[in-house]
Amino acid sequence: LEGDMRRLADSYPAAAHHLRLKWRGVDLVRLASKVGCPGDSLGALCRGVLGRGLDKSHQCSNWARRPLSEDQLRYAALDAWALLPLLSVMLANGEGASGFAEGAEGGVVALASAQLPSAAPPGGAVDAAA
């Protein structure tokens, strides 16, 4: 996460100050480590916690080219969508997980802790082998 924030700050110098402020979100990899969930990346966490992998084939595609392709949009939506069920499962199953999330924005934790709909992910782009 820190590397991503640095790359964003380097890409958007006018916003660099805001991007370098103390992170007030939940780092799922750190939370996973604290509650004993397997995985050191989003794909590994999805496999270990949710039992399904993510199709990461568009991760290194050309994100500077506009407009983004339908596949890129689907990939980005799935990456964002996967965070909520991951956080929900980790908070529900991990002892002490709620204390870990104290520094996070309360709305994020409250949203992830709520009952999630059983709807399929955006575009159905979940790959059990990924």
Image (tube, grey):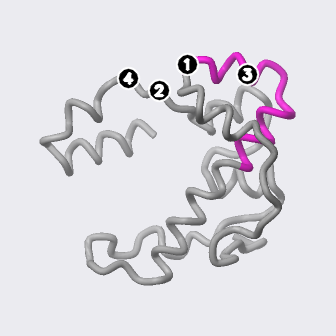
Per the image, the residue denoted by label 1 is 103
Residue at figure coordinates x 20%, y 30% from the top left: 17
Is 91 one of the magenta-colored residues? Answer: yes
For the record, the magenta segment spans: 85-103
Q: Earlier in the sequence, mark 1 or mark 3?
A: 3
User: Which quadrant of the structure image shows residue 20?
Assistant: top left
Please identify the quadrant where the C terminus is shown.
bottom right
Per the image, the residue denoted by label 2 is 24
Question: Looking at the rendered structure, which numbered label has been put on residue 22?
Answer: 4
Total labels: the figure holds 4
Q: Chief secondary structure of the magenta span?
A: helix
Label 2 is placed on what type of residue? Arg
Per the image, the residue denoted by label 3 is 98
Q: Earlier in the sequence, mark 4 or mark 1?
A: 4
Disc 3 on helix, strand or loop?
A: helix
Disc 4 on helix, strand or loop?
A: loop
User: Which quadrant of the structure image shows residue 65?
Assistant: bottom left
Q: Is residue 104 above or below residue 124?
A: above
Disc 2 on helix, strand or loop?
A: loop
